[in-house]
Image: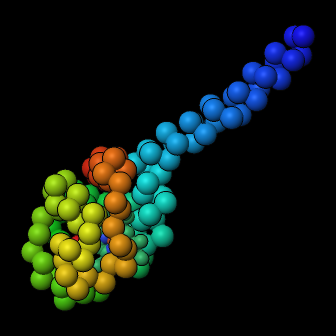
Amino acid sequence: MVMKINRAAALWVAAFLLPAMATSAHADGADVFGDNCLVCHAPEAGLQKTGPSLFGIVGRKSGSIDGFPYSDAMAKANLVWTKPMLNNYLTSPQGVVAGTKMAFPGLKNAKERSQLIDYLATLK
Ligand code: HEC
């Protein structure tokens, strides 16, 4: 009888608790970054990959990393990456900077965007 209850409890944990934990971990901004951005962007200063380093991105002027080969569109965009501007850009990169060479369709989940942007603000 005791064994049976323990097995039921173990199954309950596996069926409900583990997926719930996975969901909340996935929703964390650093994980959103890891899943969507890290392939092209480093969070560290001075490390350029396919995309420019995102260190200090919140408050930074667009197209301002010296020596990074920006598209003409980004080089001339003349934006400041405030949180609301990042929110717009990350919803639809082409919608904000038409012609950007950032090959990313946008992050459609508003909650993930907001968690991601909170994470970006810690990169300083
Ligand atoms: C496939 C590669 C790729 C992915 C994925 C990608 N980016 Fe980019 N990103 C780029 C490139 C390339 C640029 C430069 C764009 C240009 O010059 O038009 C860029 C530019 C940017 C800029 C402007 C930087 C500046 O210095 O003005 C921001 C902000 C940015 N990306 C954020 C993100 C975030 C956050 C994610 C994840 C949600 C992401 N990017 C995903 C390649 C990528």
- Residue drawn 90% across and 10% down? 1
Task: Please say if 114 is above or below 49.
Answer: above
Residue sitting nearer the eye, 112 or 1: 1
- Residue drawn 68% across and 35% down? 15
- Number of marks drawn: 0
Residue sitting nearer the eye, 1 or 84: 1
State the residue lying farthest toward the bottom: 72
Task: Please say if 15 is above or below 33.
Answer: above
Residue sitting nearer the eye, 42 or 25: 25
Image position, residue 77 (x, y; %): 12, 78
Residue 53 in view, yes or no: no
Q: Quadrant of residue 3?
A: top right
Q: Quadrant of residue 107?
A: bottom left
Picture colour scheme: rainbow
Image position, residue 61 (x, y; %): 15, 67
- Residue drawn 71% across and 34% down? 14
Residue 26 in view, yes or no: yes
Answer left or right for 35 relative to 87. Answer: right
State the residue lying farthest toward the left: 78
Image position, residue 16 (x, y; %): 63, 32
Image position, residue 9 (x, y; %): 75, 21
Give the quarter the ligand 1 occupies: bottom left
Task: Please say if 2 is above or below 97.
Answer: above
Answer left or right for 73 relative to 9. Answer: left
Answer left or right for 58 relative to 80. Answer: right
- Residue drawn 26% across and 72% down? 93
